[in-house]
Amino acid sequence: MVDLHQTLPAFPEGHPWPELGRWGMAWRAAFAVLAATMLGLLAMSAADQHGSTGFLGGTGWVTLGIVPALAGALTLWLGPWLRRYYPFSQGLIFGAIAAAGVALLIVALTAVDAVVTGSGSALVLLLFLSPPVFLACAVAYPMAIWSTTTAGAKVCWPILGLAIAGYTTATVLTHSG
């Protein structure tokens, strides 16, 4: 039988992430997920061959509100537990849990929609939202961990600024003509 128990510490001596409180981890994770989600929406809109502006319109802004908030809430709840794993593993676990959370939210909204209006069209969102949420969270959580280091802060926070500026500019240009 193979022992899969981690034998080395997940973080090197002096790394700031294990010393952070729940709130410190949560806001960093939420902002990292916001940056990853914005960059993902920009990439999807650039790859859109039909010229639709859905990723830079209403669905994009809803996603930008819900996914980072979900990431922050999940980090508040799971952050201390996740610290015992390596950052790469933390990202994968966090991404899977966030995608499952979005899936449960969509299923709940679909059930309410089906009861109220008699349709179940929101279930299609499950197919389109869960994989990107997994990817954004799996990439962003290690980025949040890295942002606590000096070198990581010099890279991660400018990426967030560029993502916000790029998404806002693309949205304005798309909707202005």
Image (spheres, helix red, strand yellow):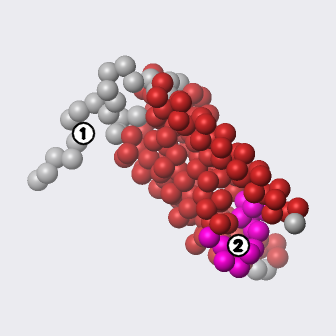
Disc number placed over residue 6 in the picture, else none: 1
**Span of residues in magenta:** 47-61
Of the residues under marks 1 and 2, which one precedes in the sequence? 1
Residue found at the far right of this picture: 176
Instruction: Tell me which corner region of the image, top left, top right, bottom left or bottom right, holds residue 82.
Output: top left
- Quadrant position of residue 16: top left
With 38 as the anchor, is 17 left or right in this view?
left
Instruction: Determine the residue positioned at 65% across, 52% down.
Output: 38
Q: Where is residue 74 in the image (x, y as percent from the top left)?
A: 56, 43
Residue that sits furthest to the top in the current view: 14
Residue 125 pos. (x, y %): 65, 70
One can see residue 72 in this view = no
Which residue type carries mark 1? Gln
> Would you name the residue on which mark 2 appears?
122
- What's under tag 2, amino acid-wise? Ala
In-front residue for pair 21/115: 21
